[in-house]
Amino acid sequence: MTETNNENKDLQKLLQRVVYLLSKYRLVEGFVTLQEDSNQDLTTSPVQKNNLQELQQLLDELHPADIADILEALPLEDRRLIWRLVKAEHDGDVLLEASDAVRETLITDMGSRELVAATEQLDADEIADLAPDLPREVIDDVFRTLPMDEREQLRSAMSYPEDVVGALMDFDVITIREDVRLEVVLRYLRRLDELPDHTDQLFVIDRDEQLKGVLLVSKLLVSDPNFTVAQVMTKEIVTLHPDDHAQQGATAFERYDLVSSSVVDADGKLLGRVTVNAVLDFIRDKAENEALNLAGLSEEEDLFAPVLKSVKNRWVWLAVNLVTAFIASRVIGLFEDSIAQLVALAALMPIIAGIGGNSGNQTITMIVRALALGQIGPDSARKLIFKEIGVSAVNGLVWGTVVGLFTFAIYENAALGLVMTSAMILNLLLAALLGVLIPLTLRKCGRDPAIGSSVLITAVTDSGGFFIFLGLATIFLL
Amino acid sequence: MTETNNENKDLQKLLQRVVYLLSKYRLVEGFVTLQEDSNQDLTTSPVQKNNLQELQQLLDELHPADIADILEALPLEDRRLIWRLVKAEHDGDVLLEASDAVRETLITDMGSRELVAATEQLDADEIADLAPDLPREVIDDVFRTLPMDEREQLRSAMSYPEDVVGALMDFDVITIREDVRLEVVLRYLRRLDELPDHTDQLFVIDRDEQLKGVLLVSKLLVSDPNFTVAQVMTKEIVTLHPDDHAQQGATAFERYDLVSSSVVDADGKLLGRVTVNAVLDFIRDKAENEALNLAGLSEEEDLFAPVLKSVKNRWVWLAVNLVTAFIASRVIGLFEDSIAQLVALAALMPIIAGIGGNSGNQTITMIVRALALGQIGPDSARKLIFKEIGVSAVNGLVWGTVVGLFTFAIYENAALGLVMTSAMILNLLLAALLGVLIPLTLRKCGRDPAIGSSVLITAVTDSGGFFIFLGLATIFLL
């Protein structure tokens, strides 16, 4: 029994092995290039040939998902070399498993003919996943090579935007009629070479392809073969629509512990199914994108992307933050006279702004999560504001006192300490109020509260914090 | 066919209905309480009885996952009332589905007897999931009520820490011998009332409970019943160990598109299995925890937690940030003389620090993600530093020029503008260098680079940014 126990440690070992073989290859390559300059073939010297063969062998044994991971971990030049060694029949699967950014670099290295060949091993729904990255003429060629029914499926799969159930759907459904006996179903299945992955249910449809219910495989196995499908089929089932948000589909899988789910159109006609592996991929991608967006990366970035590509991926966030920083800077500018009279203000003001930002972001994170889970009911907003204001009041008193004492210890100025304490309390209250209101307002305007809330609250607590602190200082100290 | 199409919108509707019924109930309650003061029973007036019945009916029809969500969305008092209306036989499942924070509030409301009863519907692995939140005496009682074999399972399940494969494992395995014919297997299955959820494979073991392979259900269905198990079983399978990190298990499910996986001990003896629904829950919890940690919430927080509980959940992060803010404040303090001479410095310095922090966090996010995916090989560190420095150099030139021009436009001081530009470039380079080094160093010290990297980089770019900018200004402008 092989243990395909796949952990990062194992991947690290694989990666080390690949890098080692590559370095040996390159060493000889350098040597050979020094001697003769006319070689363009990959396999020039016998030693190199040897290393490449070993690499190829290693790659042939790997699962496409593992190959994709190794490719992602390699700098561009090495990646290209390894990619050329991957068996053509794996090309399609590796492209599917690779992240968007890395897939792009792989496709750039392939000719049209190669690309068309790579899609030949794939199902229509998988080709549709690759389609946005493929050149127009390749897609046209693919269409031409497909049989009629798959062409229809591909057209349908390509018609859905990325974030709806239709984009997660595949067409590997086994359909049966409700009036046959289970014995007949069993015999029918035995005539197939294999069942589609993740077949935990057969779909019961009528003459008009209307979905009437499902026959669970687990039910089929424990039931008397003399029963008819109608007698043992499940009628209360989860059905998805192709235009449902993909997130809704994923939630259904999480809640009801599904392995697969039918997808039907508005008239109840069976279109295809969604399987849990598509849902897992969707959830992982989504979590990753959220983490990236939070840090201001527009999309996942190839670790070894060229510098200018990375700059492009990151500039929007920096530009937005620069604008908010300019605004905060002008707020401070209003109080330059005060600062000139009491320079300590300059050293103290970042404390007020910083802690306000942290506290505001804690509130935002809570609220955005609750909104995503649909937990904020009609009457909750007011309750939540009161709660967050309460939390901020306590935090303001505690941390305000701490910074007040810190200030007094350093500047021996009791009035300045009191201004610090008051400013801290006020800025935390501002953070709490807007930490609730910003995401709720974004949601009301039909925007995704996960995007932008954090930048907005930080802008408010920065500029607001400077204004409150310097304003109080100007009134009470000067 | 019922459509259990479960989206947030539907949950919102349900929630509105529950809140509406509750408010009607409360209205009458208030009225009744005014009239007579001796009522303690829930169902006092006929009208109230009616509302409660309608509520109860609504709840009886819901999936436990949906009930858990409704409970999470309700303020404490309403939550308690609804919780008392949930059928006792659903109690266990609802507790399982609720988030940790909310589960605590539900358990507080239950007596020992009720809690023991709630566990009766659950499997050993599910009871183990609840165990950390149950009072000691309840667990002892549960142990006493369990049959011998389940007691052993519960003991074993409770022995694993939260983040290993053992904690995701269940014991619902169907085992068969390799020398029997498929026909016998089919007959054996037919004698069962039902198959465990997610049974996509039967586990083939020998006399010593050693796992020899698996019989895929999809294979069983398409094969000639006269074959023996040995002839059609799969030997190359993914096996997990109970002490593997749960994340490794989850990765295996994602890569190899598994529905279930065997768990074996070091000697190859079958212990249980992990199913994809446990993996889905793990992935969701993990993604959520990471998002919460990033914002400095120690754990998921009940939306309606009491103020002091929320304060406790959030104070560590605020305290850490306060310390870094104090340090930054002292760095500025070093240059108070310079600021007194040129007050514009006070207004400009937050721009340098802020953009440095943003850029550093972009780098950190990239590196932490790559580390989590095991993509950073032996030679990559140097390459990554060069790349990030390149990105920062470009960003520094671009944004440095922008802030330089901004400064010149406002203060009409070319030298000050040049100092801004230089400080921006230097702080971005610092952010790039440490954005790579901080997570790599944390990893080398055996710590999770996802925790703390962000605070550290912000501390560096704040204090570093102030020091660079004010230092340059002191040298060149004064």
Image: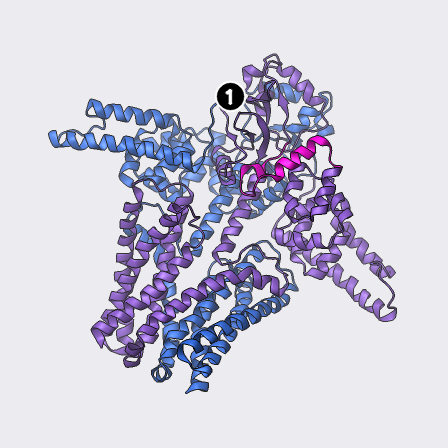
Chain colours: A blue, B purple
Q: Is residue B146 magenta?
A: yes
Q: For this view, does A284 lie left or right of residue A182?
A: left
Picture quadrant where residue A20 is located: top left
Query: Would you say B19 lies left or right of B396 here?
Result: right
Answer left or right for A251 relative to B352: right
Q: Position of residue A50 (x, y in %)?
A: 25, 23
Secondary structure at badge 1 equals loop
Identify which residue is drawn at 70% across, 27% down. Answer: A229
The correct choice, above or below, for B218 with respect to A468 in the image is: above
Q: Is residue A87 visible?
A: no
The kind of residue on which mark 1 rests is Lys
Would you place residue A45 above or below residue A253 in this image? Answer: above
Pointer 1: what residue?
B235
Residue B468's x, y, as percent? 28, 66
Bounds of the magenta segment: B145-171
Q: Is residue A254 above or below residue A55?
A: below
Q: Is residue B16 visible?
A: yes
Q: Position of residue A472 (x, y in %)?
A: 46, 82
Q: Determine whether A168 is above or below A47 in the image.
A: below
Which is more toward the observer, A365 or B163?
B163
How many numbered marks appear?
Answer: 1
Q: Nearer the viewer, residue A397 or A75?
A: A397
Q: Residue furthest top?
A: B226
- The picture places residue A236, in percent across and down from the top left corner, at 70, 39
